[in-house]
Amino acid sequence: MKRYFFVLLIVLSHFVQAQNQVLEAVDSESLGIKGAILNREIDKIMEQAIDSTAFPGGQILLAKDGKVFFHRAYGYHTYSKAREVQLTDIYDLASVTKTTAATLALMKLYDDGLFDPDQTMGFYFPKVAKGKKKDLVMRDVLAHQAGLRAWIPYWSESQNKKGKFKSKTVSSDSSANYPFRLSESDLFMHKDFIEKKIYKMIKKSKVSDDKSYLYSGLTFYLIPELVERLTDKTFDQYLQEQFYGPLGSKTMGFNPTDRFVLDEIVPTEVDSFFRMQTLHGVVHDEGAAMMKGVSGNAGLFSNAMDLAKVYQMLLNDGVYDGKQYLKPSTIEEFTRCQFCESGNRRGLGWDKPLVDYRFNASSVARGASPESYGHTGYTGTLVWADPKNDLLFVFLSNRVHPTRDSRKIYELNVRPRIHNLVYDLFRIGQEGTYTIGQHWD
């Protein structure tokens, strides 16, 4: 009986510890991973990438069991090398916004009985979801297999054939009808542009009868308005109150120049076709810019540590520092592969490992478990959480600087090489020595 009681105390102790788990820095050797090899190999990959102009710099964070065993900054903000990247610097997360803002909000609404993924698009977005869109099931929509158009270039579709902006879209002059400045450019958006143009373009977009997987960001433009309608809080306010503030993710949020100086924010592209400026402290994505910087599709900024706090909370079954943010069942439901049987790897809003792994086509490691989930961002970002291995990988860069045309981050397989390295090193610790990278292709 005493032995049983002692075992029970140990189990309860581990449970309480897990429930209060927060990220803490440790030496990698304490986790059985060879620090000298880890540092050398990641340094080598990052130096090659920077020297090859895949990106000017970046941040990497790796955590196991809630313990941060690698957290480094590399390179510079730009190729001018005027400012080195600091661990506190803030990056444009691009489509990582889809999971860290829009999907996170839907998960909380699901917890509170305000969102049902098996309800229709017409039910949640009655003004926009007309015709075929009306009957699309949100589960299919969030798994990117509803037949929606992949994307709409709102800025260019607002122009006529001569390249001039159409009436009631964008103007070069500020006025009562054009009060919203687009980023820091000399362009001003019409006061009704979001409601009368963006939503209208989504409403008029065609729905394909082919329901196979096609990544689409259209619905993520609508989610902020849904959140506001259901909670009486603006999208950014809701996320700040429910997640970012309590988690202590101080750098995470939209429109970062409202809170931080430019030197703390890493620039993205030199925009030579729309805003005609270096995009610095403003969202890179044109559609999110036309949503005044607050969108479910893109627009979120953060440093690696503050992003990691959100994902460690998810790995902790919805708990961080003793506070319950989401139910474990909600996390499991949203992050599971919804339609693997048809070859679609996606969860509800979440990306998942390829059903059939191919190194050159994947952003993550071969060893990432089927339970793992995360998302990439167009600006050169990635976050990936593996609950089976309790492993977290955060990678931030500005690969679109100075131009989005650079694809070297993909050609060099920077992110999957680092991710594979980590899984390899944990196997070395468990099984003995073998050649690094032998499982990468």
Image (tube, rainbow, N blue to C red):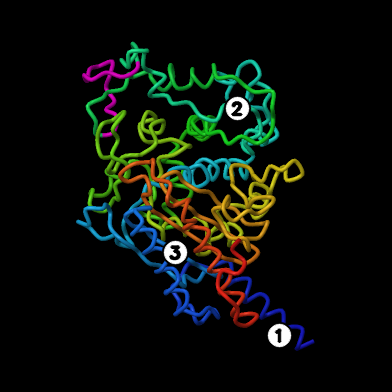
For this rendering, which residue is in front, 165 or 237?
Answer: 165
Answer with mark 2 or mark 1, whichever residue precedes in sequence: 1
Residue farthest along the bottom direction in this orientation: 2
Main secondary structure along the magenta-highlighted residues: loop
Residue at the spot of label 3:
61
Residue type beneath disc 2: Leu
For this rendering, which residue is in front, 150 or 437?
Answer: 437
Residue at the spot of label 1:
6
| Residue at the spot 48% in from the left edge and 50% down from the top edge | 410
Task: Tell me the quadrant of the picture where the N terminus can be found.
Answer: bottom right
Answer with mark 3 or mark 1, whichever residue precedes in sequence: 1
**Quarter where residue 347 is shown:** top right
Alpha-carbon span between mark 2 and mark 1: 57 Å
For this rendering, which residue is in front, 189 or 278?
Answer: 278
Depth check, mark 2 against mark 1: the one in front is 2
Please give the range of residues in magenta. Answer: 169-183
Residue type beneath disc 1: Phe
Depth check, mark 3 against mark 1: the one in front is 3
For this rendering, which residue is in front, 334 or 320?
Answer: 334
Answer with mark 2 or mark 3, whichever residue precedes in sequence: 3
Q: Position of residue 69 (x, y in %)?
A: 47, 73
Residue type beneath disc 3: Leu
Q: Position of residue 116 (x, y in %)?
A: 66, 36
Q: Position of residue 363 (x, y in %)?
A: 54, 53
Q: Is residue 430 left or right of residue 77?
A: right
Q: Which label sits on residue 148?
A: 2
Alpha-carbon span between mark 2 and mark 3: 35 Å
